[in-house]
Amino acid sequence: MVTILVAAHDSPPKRKGSAIYVCDGTDDHVQINQAISASEAGDTVLLAAGTYNVRGNLYPKGRTTFRGEGRSKTHLNFTNNAHLFVDAEYTNIEEFSFDGTGYSTSSHIWFGVVNIRASHARIRGVDGTADKTLNAVFHTLSCNMTPTAPLKDIEFKDCSATDTGTYGFLHNWWDNDPDLQTHTDIRYIGCSAIRCGNANGTGAKGHFNNWVVGFDFAETNNIDNLYVNQCRAEENLESGFHMEWDPIKTNCVFEDCIAIGNGAKPYPHGPVKPNPSAILDYFGSGWYLPNYQGYLYRCTSEENTRCGFWVTNGGVLVDCVDRRCGHGRTDFTYVKPSSFYGYPCRTIRDGKSLHLVRCKSIDSNGYGYWYDLAAGVILEDCDLVNPAGIGGNGTQFGSQYSWYFKDSSIGFKKIIASPNVTAIYARHNNNVTYGPGVLVSDSEKPFVIAGVGTKDVTVQDWTTVSKTLRTGSVGLYLVEGASPGMVRWYNSRVVTEDPLPNYDPDPDPDPQPTPAPTSANIVPVVVVAAAGAGAYLLLKRAKKGTR
């Protein structure tokens, strides 16, 4: 195992004197490729501190390390349609920075500057950027150049894509070989995607297309066994952490990740997906994970302009927090922000479609929670604090459009809402339980159940703290065709004293990571349906102030 030293034209004189290959600053890929050709298994090709002008492709060998002397010291400028391709297994790429500019032909623009097309790759301590003329900064791609199927065991650690005109980290699948479609055992640790498609916060580099995101883990590829830890997505054009609808995503985990200010793209002026009449896409979320089978632990979303967590059909979110969703936006005609969102969300897996445990919506500029065309949604010990609301509603479970929100259980630790907001708005619910919950609000209608489609709704162990509603009443309002025979109350009442006076839903805006819960902590809550006749009597008594 040897180290083959390459020096740049501007490397320190001592490094030039020690180097086997010295570049002239023009076509530096020539000398770099000579060093790569001379390397054998176990060797390191080391680029000394300096700037390298790369005008042709680089292909590091398998079982070797391609390394710089540090991301602040070794820098590669890729021009003339040049890329770095990891096409051999067990290749390590380490400790340098790069940029890519001026890609001009179709055979080049759909790649990234750095392309991972082989398994068992390690990319560590590498910072990159690129203009809008190609598809990605880092592109993990399975295609006919991938030596074995499936593409697996790839790790990005302490890498970044910053101030780009294109996607930061992108996964993809080409050439229609189904054996290559799934990327498996993928890890991102301590990585960041900052202002992708929104360079310098101004869009100075433009963007490759209208849907540039920070991390895209499943564009056309399936993904299995993804692990993302302590990564950050900030001020990207569209989503921070993203997956497309159609790919299969299984055994995925995010831990202690942060998404801030994503959705820099202007709000659309027409319908957006997934509405049936959609003509435009607008992702704009911290996490955009439709049909996601996996977990999010202790993830934080702040000031993302559409949704904090858009997760559907299989996800489990534990101790996740969204703050100030919809920040900076005012026109909600076509885009209605929500901290936690799922529409549609009705594919039942393991007895549920979505499970939120101890999640928090703080100061949403729209809804706190919005689930529609949904079934099997479970909220357990969640919090809702000061939602601005849309149309006067701080949450929305079901709507006049779908007539479909059913077989769900919605429980809150604490809700704090202003007097001008209906904190809980439930429409056309079927076999849904609300509670337990503590709702602190002086609204005239803090909890509304609406719609003639309402059926078998249970409200249990629910306390409304109010200085305006009559003590002993239930604090629940039925409107727009919902009737007492459709709803049951158990242990639900209005009081003047907060039963949780010392509980602060958001005591620390930047909490330290807490241990992940065991599986016993996230089992689904059983939805209980009671007999209609007895429930009607309980409702009548509750209206008279008895329990």
Image: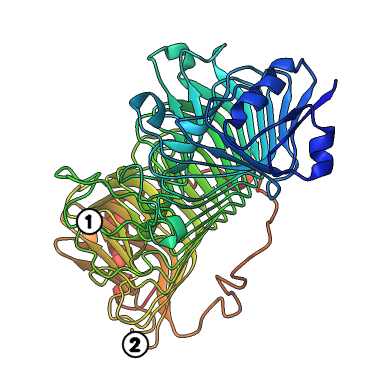
Q: Residue at x 28, y 81 (%)?
A: 444
Of the 4 image quadrants, the one containing the N terminus is top right
Q: What residue is pinned by disc 2?
A: 468
**What is the CA distance from the residue labelled 1 to the residue labelled 2?**
40 Å
N-terminal of the pair, mark 1 or mark 2, is: 1
| 310 sits left or right of 278 in the view | right
User: Viewed as shown, does residue 395 lie left or right of 22?
Assistant: left
The dot on residue 268 is 1
Element on which disc 1 rests: loop
Mark 1 is surrounded, within 10 Å at the Cα level, by few (under 14), some (14 to 19) or many (20 or more) other residues, namely some
At which x and y percent is residue 266?
Answer: 28, 59
Comparing 298 with 85, the one in front is 85
Q: In the visual, does 153 lie left or right of 373?
A: right
Q: Is residue 207 above or below residue 152?
A: below
Q: Residue 193's spot in the image, x, y percent?
A: 52, 49
- Tell me the colour scheme of the image: rainbow
Q: Give the quarter of the figure containing the C terminus.
A: bottom left
Is label 2 in a helix, a strand or a loop?
A: loop
* Residue type at numbered disc 2: Thr
Q: Residues within 10 Å of mark 2 (few under 14, many from 20)?
A: few
Q: Amino acid at mark 1?
A: Pro
